[in-house]
Image (cartoon, helix red, strand yellow):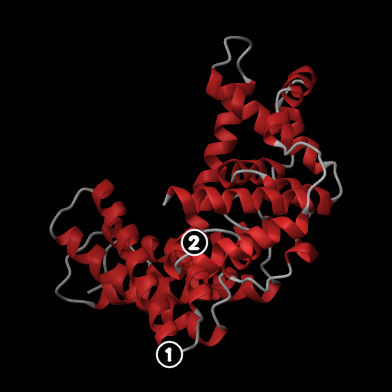
Amino acid sequence: MPIEGFDYKAFAADLAAQAAEILKGGGNATPEGLTDADKKNITDTVRKFCFMSGEALSNDPQIKFNAQQASLVTQFIGEWTYHKSIDLILGKVPVQFREGILQIIAANIFNTAKLAIIKKMKQELLVNLIEEKVKQVYSDELQKLVKKGVLAPQQFEAAVNKSNLNDFVQKNEDEAKLENISQKSSDVAPQDKKVLKIAALAILLKRLPQKKAEEIISALDKNIAIHVINYMKMSNIEEKLDHQVIIKSLEEIKQLIPPSKTVNVPRLLQKHHKLISLSAPDKLSTLAMGERVSVKNFILDKNFPAQNVFSAHVIESLVNSVEKKVNDN
């Protein structure tokens, strides 16, 4: 029996149109690296899965959902299909397996959300439950591809750690912090000063040649680098900060950039190769988890051509970082 006030066909089309608009305009919810074909596929998949969800809810005689409840289930599927589609693409999961994984995720969202609503679970708890379910199913499906020999363990780590939703949330948080700080005329807290330094560094790096900027970012602590990258993507960041604040902050960020000095790269690589030869593979895999592909390969592969990929100072920073983490663990 149709659900009063719930036009699932129109709702699916609307969610797909929202996805298409976001993909067209870029912004925080859309990362770089998606082709036009990728974007069309994402939009089409969102429409199809939302249509299927709405149709199933409307045609199930045992479900007594109202329009708001039916819309919530369908919206969960639309939003997670959007984000996990991007994760599968950027995680380089072979295209022939993507829709199948997305369909399994959508089915689990549908069943989990439906049961939770029937049990009258609070919405904030339901949101968390759905997120945990999606993470688990996504990981399980990728692990199946590893067992089939479709994905190598390193590819699995790269794909499973992709999270467009987390990136989206982090970008919004960074922008909100900067917006809040920019409106203050005085009494800048210590944590705000750190944000200003990072934003100022981002402004500086935007004006450097891309290769040089990437070298500096690679040398930064990854917990700082992610915020620098987010601010570099803000088109109007220069308008958020007073010019004098930018200059002052740049004077205070020298500790974020490795000092200039002569680096003996062959000796560093010899030290690094010895270290990873003596370290347990599972420990190295744990250290490499969540790192960029080039850094992951540097940690795991003694034959990785580090000198062709990184500058001398970046190699020094990476070797020191790996050594510290190995010793700490």
Secondary structure under the numbered disc 2 in the rendered image = loop
Residue at the spot x=41%, y=71% of the render?
50
Q: Residue 66: in sight, yes or no? A: yes
Q: Is residue 1 above or below residue 127?
A: below
The answer to whether residue 255 is left or right of residue 2 is right
**Which residue is denoted by mark 2 in the rendering?**
289
Residue 168 appears at what percent x and percent y? 53, 50
The mark found on residue 148 in the picture is: 1
The answer to whether residue 149 is left or right of residue 33 is left
Residue 214 appears at what percent x and percent y? 75, 51
**Extreme top residue here?**
186
The answer to whether residue 169 is left or right of residue 1 is right
Residue at the spot x=48%, y=69% of the render?
157
Residue at the spot x=15%, y=61% of the render?
118
The three-letter amino acid code for the residue at tag 1 is: Lys
Residue 95 appears at what percent x and percent y? 56, 83
* Mark 2 closeness class: few <14, some 14–19, many ≥20 residues within 10 Å: some
> Do residues under tags 2 and 1 come within 8 Å of each other at their CB atoms?
no
